[in-house]
Image (cartoon, rainbow, N blue to C red):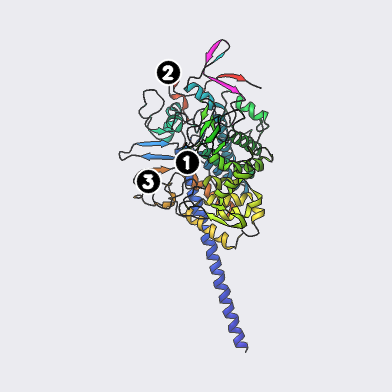
Amino acid sequence: MLNLQFKSMQINKWIFFFLFLAFGAEQLLAQSLEQDLLKKYQNYRQRLENEFVVISPDVELYGVNIPAIDRKTDPYGNQNLRWSDGNSNFNNYISMLVTEITLLKQHGQDYQTSLNELVYTFLAIERLDLYSEYNLRKFWNDKILHDGDSTNAYIKYPADINGFMLRDDVSFGFWRRYHTHFGIEFGKPNENLTKTNKYFSVFQQGIEPMQAMSQDNVIRMLEALALTHHLMGKEPVYDIPLNFINPLIPHYLKEQDIMTKDSVDFKRWTEDLTTRLIKNMQQPEGQSAMCLKPWYSIGRESKNQFLSILSTRWYMSNPVREKHVAEGSGNDMGIFINAYGLGEYGNRLTGKNDFHFEGSQFGLKKYLFYMAVFKEIPLPLGAAIPLPKNFDDVLPRTLAASANISSKRRKIFLQLRDKRADHTFEHMIMTNYLMNKEDLADFYHPGTEMWTEDSTFIADILAVAPPNGPFSDTSKPNYSVHWCTSSRVIWPAHEPSKRATKDFEFAGIDYLMLHNLYRLVYGGDNYYLNLTPIRKRDMNFNKYTHEGKQQNSQFFIHAPVIIREK
């Protein structure tokens, strides 16, 4: 009997020993994966700073602190740097910086470099907001009489700080000044000295010159602002170098109690930007409505709403051209469908009940928004008709993930976990969880099936990202279909993209953003980030002359006439 007990004890010891080994091995594998992903992050981070963005304290210079998104190389080795259509630039970059700062804080590391970049990026948004009308007035030669002289170089202050923005301001002058930073030739200028063949920006060559932001751009920026509002508060700014050309931006930020000489309040800043962006989608009484009539294929602006199937003043207008923006204006009734989500987002982020418009808090707009989010047509008694799988629900889902809609919080989270082959937006799972952790923790936490499934899925996605940056060319080593577009959080792919035979390299900000969200949600203790650049940037900014015709090439924003309005 004693011998049997002794053997049983020996067997139990071996069982515990093997269980200990298995658990230890699992922990070592997890730590190894985290370190591999962090090493890749470090590489992507330095590559971004050295090859895709000019980080500058001269925050009012055109083009600075807005990252490029991809770099195309033709069969002859000629390169072209591209700022894309503005959908992922600010969204991914702000989200990456905010989550990076949060991780550095959590692990007791210095975050000054990241904070500088975040402030500079927000000031790039302010630059776009203040100077967009100014740039358009100059381009279209929209003159006024001021102090006995006609001028097109004027700003209405504070009226021009209104949420209307161009997608970027990457100009010919910016490229001439900074092209060596990117390691790319200056290229051949066009006749008007507005661009060269070595870079692409929407500022120079969109659907129309100096193309304005669309509803897609705005809603994706709101996504990043929601994350910033949740994770950031007041931060010191006295150690951040800042150089302004004109006094208007610092004056405005001080008046709004956003930035003083000592600190910046990111919660107030995101609330103020949110107010401007959403209010810019709400056209005032007396202005034309966007009308969809039986004989129109798409909505048109009209003061006569007679016989309209739908009419709304939820749309985006260009105040200089006095017509809707060239693309994504809401003339497809997209903003009308998203109106409930926009109103809820604004109310919940700012804490003010001020963002619903034209009855968007109830009725048809609310019905259409939830129909788009859940991809079904609700019927009485809880029944529903599913919408086609290819129905585009991205923008409603983006707002639902960010708007913190309490009445349907759990249902929305479960909907965000829908991992469709060509519409997998895994970042929404993580951002929604971070902003609603207390309400979701009862069913979504370590050890649950959903938690394990999501964390494994996202870790596997991060693990297959190419070590030296994502790209499109299927013939290159380390190609991954998951990283073959300029941003998988905007345009995820499940098969090679239409660029599969072309040589596009991408900035990889999507990887940086997803990595940080993964670490914040699913954990990991071994975290150390070294933000020392691997290559010193070209800081000799004054070596380029700009005489003769090049005075018109947008090197600088000169001090314009300021028309102050109450």
| 2 and 3 marks in contact (CB < 8 Å) | no
Q: Which residue is mark 3?
A: 498
Please determine whether, in this image, residue 497 is positioned above or below residue 180: below
Magenta residues (range): 147-165
The 10 Å Cα crowd at callout 2, few under 14, some 14 to 19, many 20 or more, is few
What kind of element bears circle 3? loop
The amino acid at mark 1 is Leu
* Outermost residue, left side: 76
Residue 187 is situated, as x and y percent measured from the top left of the image, at 36, 30
As shown in the figure, which amino acid type bears the numbered disc 3? Answer: Lys
Q: Is residue 111 visible?
A: yes
Q: Nearer the observer, disc 3 or disc 1?
A: 3
Position of residue 493 in the picture relative to residue 13 (left or right): left
Marks 3 and 1, Cα distance to the nearest angstrom?
Answer: 24 Å
Where in the figure is residue 290, as x and y percent of width and height?
A: 54, 34
Coordinates of residue 117 in the picture (x, y in percent): 55, 37
Q: Which residue sits furthest bottom?
A: 1
Query: Mark 1 = which residue?
Result: 48
Tag on residue 547? 2
